[in-house]
Image: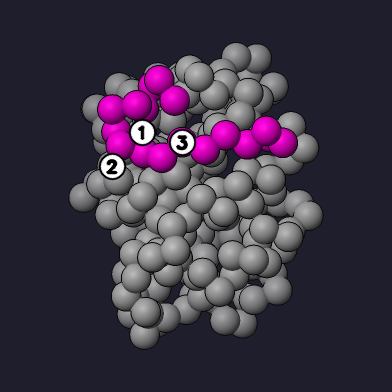
């Protein structure tokens, strides 16, 4: 069983959006910006605190979510890779939290239910890792127990994937449909996602 301490959220929002050609975190999808949606879902799922790791677009991103009660932290090394943002987020997790869920805001088909399921599996099993799996691919959101924080801080590449590989035998995997893995990196991907979600109604991707 888990140690019943709280679970923090880490929303990685420090990227430079080079493939999009503009700040993708402020793109509107399904009635709200990508970064606002991710922070909102994290809070509604029960993650506390929600730590927002910012980088190149720090000021604009922080303004976008300033009313949501998240905890911004700036990563001055954001250009060197996503692993530095994960480490920065982990370092900001309060001592009274026993785990943290790492989330990416450019995954518009991620839902609050997915995040809550990771938290529930952690509470039920006490597993140090609860990993989302989309077909054959492991990807965020991923829950890391506090016992892995130091290792996460030392990783050299990736969004915690090294840690997942090392500890796969101790991990609990939660299966999701492969199409939930879709992200928004390029203009054509954004337009496709925007049209798809607009066709089925506001916040269709946020089932209870």
Q: Residue furthest top?
A: 22
x and y percentages locating residue 105 in the rendered image: 48, 37
Q: Magenta residues, as a range?
A: 62-78
Secondary structure category for the residue under label 1 = helix
> Left or right: 128 with respect to 207?
right
x and y percentages locating residue 198 in the rendered image: 32, 23
Identify the mark at residue 206; answer none if there is no mark: 2
Identify the mark at residue 72; answer none if there is no mark: 3
Residue at x 51% of width, y 75% of height: 128
Q: Is 97 rendered above or below residue 64?
A: below
Q: How far is disc 1 from disc 3 in space, using C-alphas? A: 15 Å
What residue is pinned by disc 1? 37
Mark 3 neighbour density, 10 Å: few (under 14) some (14–19) many (20 or more): many
x and y percentages locating residue 80 in the rendered image: 77, 37
**Quick one: label 3 or label 2, which is nearer the N terminus?**
3
Q: Is 185 rendered above or below residue 187?
A: below
């Amino acid at each position: 069983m888990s140690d019943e301490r709280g679970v923090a959220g880490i929303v990685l929002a420090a990227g430079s959006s080079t493939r999009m050609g503009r700040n993708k975190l402020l793109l509107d999808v399904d009635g709200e910006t990508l970064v606002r949606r991710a922070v909102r879902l994290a809070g509604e799922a029960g993650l506390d605190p929600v730590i927002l790791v910012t980088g190149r677009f720090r000021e604009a991103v922080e303004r976008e979510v300033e009313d949501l009660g998240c905890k911004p932290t700036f990563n001055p090394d954001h250009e060197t890779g996503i692993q530095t943002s994960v480490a920065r987020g982990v370092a900001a997790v309060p001592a009274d939290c026993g785990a943290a869920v790492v989330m990416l805001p450019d995954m518009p088909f991620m839902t609050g239910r997915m995040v809550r399921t990771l938290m529930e599996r952690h509470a039920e099993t006490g597993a140090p890792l609860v990993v989302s799996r989309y077909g054959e691919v492991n990807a965020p959101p991923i829950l890391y127990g506090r016992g892995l924080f130091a290792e996460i801080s030392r990783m050299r590449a990736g969004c915690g994937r090294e840690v997942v590989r090392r500890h796969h035998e101790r991990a609990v995997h939660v299966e999701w449909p492969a199409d939930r893995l879709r992200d928004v990196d390029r203009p054509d991907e954004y337009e496709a996602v925007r049209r798809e979600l607009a066709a089925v109604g506001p916040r269709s991707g946020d089932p209870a």
